[in-house]
Amino acid sequence: MSEYPASGPPPQIPATRAPVPRPKPTTTLRQRLSELRGPSVAPHPLDARALAALAANPGCKRRALLDGAGVDKAVLATALGSPAAFGQSQFAFVRGNAFEAKVKADGGTELLRLLFERLGGGAEPPARAAVPDLTAAGPEGRAARTALALREATEAGGWALLDHPMLVLEVAGSPAYLEPDAVVVHPDGTWTVVEIKSFPMIDSSADAAKVGAAARQSAVYVLALERIAAVTEGAEVAHRVLLVCPKDFSNLPTASVVDVRKQRAVTSRQLTRLTRVEDIAAALPEGTTFDPGCSPEALGSAVEAVPAAYAPECLAACELAFHCRAKARAEGAVESLGRSVRGELGGLTTVAGVLAAAAGKEGDPADPTVAALRRAAALRAEALAGVDGGVPCR
């Protein structure tokens, strides 16, 4: 006999609910990057020179992550035992600051004169230009203040000189704050980037390598300004920048106009190819940090956890280049011989593999690269045999 009364259904037994798992706390990108460089380490600013170098080697995830996280690569290289052997001397730094102050003196009178001399088309330079105050708290505040000053100057329809404005450009998902020497706003709404360098311009020409580096740096500024101009009515960023240098061997300023359309297009394409910083950071082992207070062994393991794309050109642009070169040589990687050699060797990735293929010990004879190596090795052996046998070389 049932223990339940016949007059109604049996009482419902409340079901036991399974505990709902709490979502794990998410780590923001800012927090993750702070952990990578060390909680007590201030972020190292990413300038236009470093950005141009980064754009020249977009396949290097190591540099993209370190620059995006604000890691000081010079300090990191020193901690790893491979300090960078390049950089601006203190004397050159002081001389450059003195020359820049001379160019911008008296409200930028000399700078505007040079601008009209090269870009004015015979018009008379203005008697004065507005010099807005760009001071604000932090790089974010300065960038917002610069954007506002550019819009106000464009709307006013007059001449304006922005001294050391702060621009922002997103690189691999992380903001980079850039500070050009000056930006001039024309009455027609054109914005012109001004780069002031301390290397001389002799007989109206300067060192081609230094001018090329200045053009790539200016192209980064042009890209950042275009973001602001896109939301500013009547504004247009000029692709011809003004390069100001000392004339001959004096301290008198002279100027030249540099077209950066090619550099701008290349830099924009390369920056777009960069892998996002959060994707690179997500692939790292838990607890990876580049804090300079860690041991050299721990720092070496952290650096090696991020893939690099070393090339000899890095020696003039990256503080970690000597460390990466040592590793590439130790591994026998063909990248240490240069990008052009790496491209010619196809699937052969090590120097030992190349030598083995040339000697006929490894490799597919049908492979054009292997065939070319064996032909070169045969020609070399023939030439050496001729020398040993006393046959004169032609």
Image (cartoon, grey):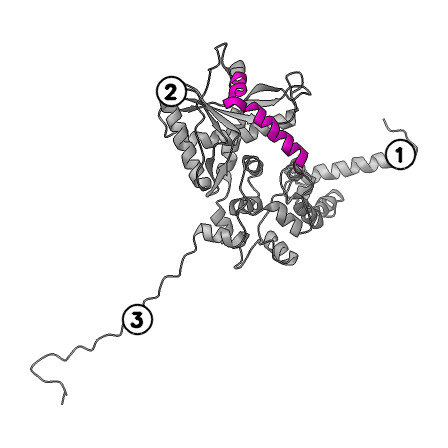
Q: Is residue 121 above or below residue 292?
A: above
- Residue drawn 11% across the image and 79% down it: 9
For this rendering, which residue is in front, 248 or 350?
Answer: 248
**Residue 334 colored in magenta in the image:** no
For this rendering, which residue is in front, 273 or 163?
Answer: 163
Earlier residue among tags 2 and 1 = 2
x, y percent for residue 350: 68, 46
Q: Residue furthest top?
A: 122
Q: Secondary structure at mark 3?
A: loop
x, y percent for residue 377: 77, 39
Residue hosting label 1: 387
x, y percent for residue 212: 60, 27
**Disc 3 to disc 2: CB gap under 8 Å:** no
What is the spatial separation of the Cα atoms under label 2 and label 1, in whole angstroms? 77 Å
Q: Secondary structure at mark 1?
A: helix
Numbered circle sitting on residue 18: 3
Residue hosting label 2: 157
Earlier residue among tags 3 and 2 = 3
Tell me the kind of residue under disc 2.
Gly
Numbered circle sitting on residue 338: none
Earlier residue among tags 3 and 1 = 3
Which secondary structure type mostly characterizes the magenta part of the structure? Answer: helix
Tell me the kind of residue under disc 3.
Ala
**Residue 92 colored in magenta in the image:** yes
- Residue drawn 58% across the image and 27% down it: 100
Magenta highlight range? 86-115
Tell me if 342 is positioned left or right of 181 in this view: right
Q: Is residue 75 visible?
A: yes
x, y percent for residue 141: 42, 39
